[in-house]
Amino acid sequence: MNSKRLVIAILVLFVGVFITDFLIHGVWLKAVYKDTASLWRTEAEMTTRMGWMMFAQFLFAATFTVIWAAGFEAHRHLRCACLYGLFMGLFSQAMTIITYVVQPFPPSLAVKWFAAGVTQGLLLGVLVHLVYKNKPADGAATA
């Protein structure tokens, strides 16, 4: 594992998670959240907890990147990156199904969360593939 590339990839993926989460939740699903406001914290309450949200996004990006670097990066194929992202998206979205079972929110929201999460995983798989990849010198050093 290349530490410098790992740190850069984690930071890039953190930005990717932050941007895609904003597009998903702050733009696409904003009206749904407004219509179901009784189910959520107030905007002021969420704002006071934004540090926790960013920590969780960073933790997700770091975990996603380290698993890729430790076990999948050696394949260096876009197809592998897409499959990795797809399965990580499915893995993370299993919690959406569980949340739907125990919380009273519309099924359409669960479907949108699930689809958005799987799509986000796929995009992050491509992003980690593009950012954390061996350079020719790395391959020569290990050969």
Image: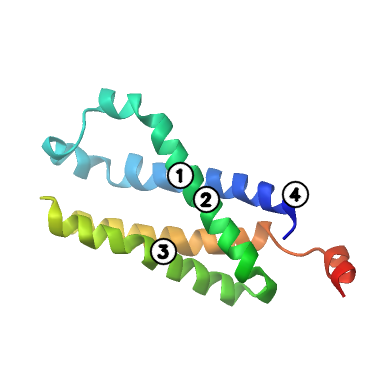
Labelled disc at residue 107: none
**Mark 2 to mark 4 CA distance (whole Å):** 16 Å
**Number of marks drawn:** 4
Residue for badge 2: 61
User: At which x and y percent is residue 56?
Assistant: 43, 43
- Residue 109 in view in this figure: yes
| Amino acid at dot 2 | Ala
User: At which x and y percent is residue 63?
Assistant: 52, 55
SS label for mark 3: helix
Residue for badge 1: 57
For marks 4 and 3, the one nearer the N-term is 4
**Mark 4 to mark 3 CA distance (whole Å):** 26 Å
**Mark 1 to mark 2 CA distance (whole Å):** 6 Å
- Residue 19 in view in this figure: no
Proximity of marks 1 and 2: CB atoms separated by less than 8 Å: yes
Residue for badge 3: 89
How many neighbours does mark 3 have within 10 angstroms: few (below 14), some (14-19), or many (20 or more)? many
The vertical placement of 126 against 12, above or below, is below
For marks 1 and 3, the one nearer the N-term is 1
Residue drawn 23% across the image and 62% down it: 97
Depth check: give the residue in front, 127 or 52.
52
**Mark 1 to mark 3 CA distance (whole Å):** 14 Å
SS label for mark 1: helix
Q: In this rendering, would 94 be left or right of 108?
A: right
| Amino acid at dot 4 | Lys
Residue for badge 4: 4
**Mark 1 to mark 4 CA distance (whole Å):** 20 Å
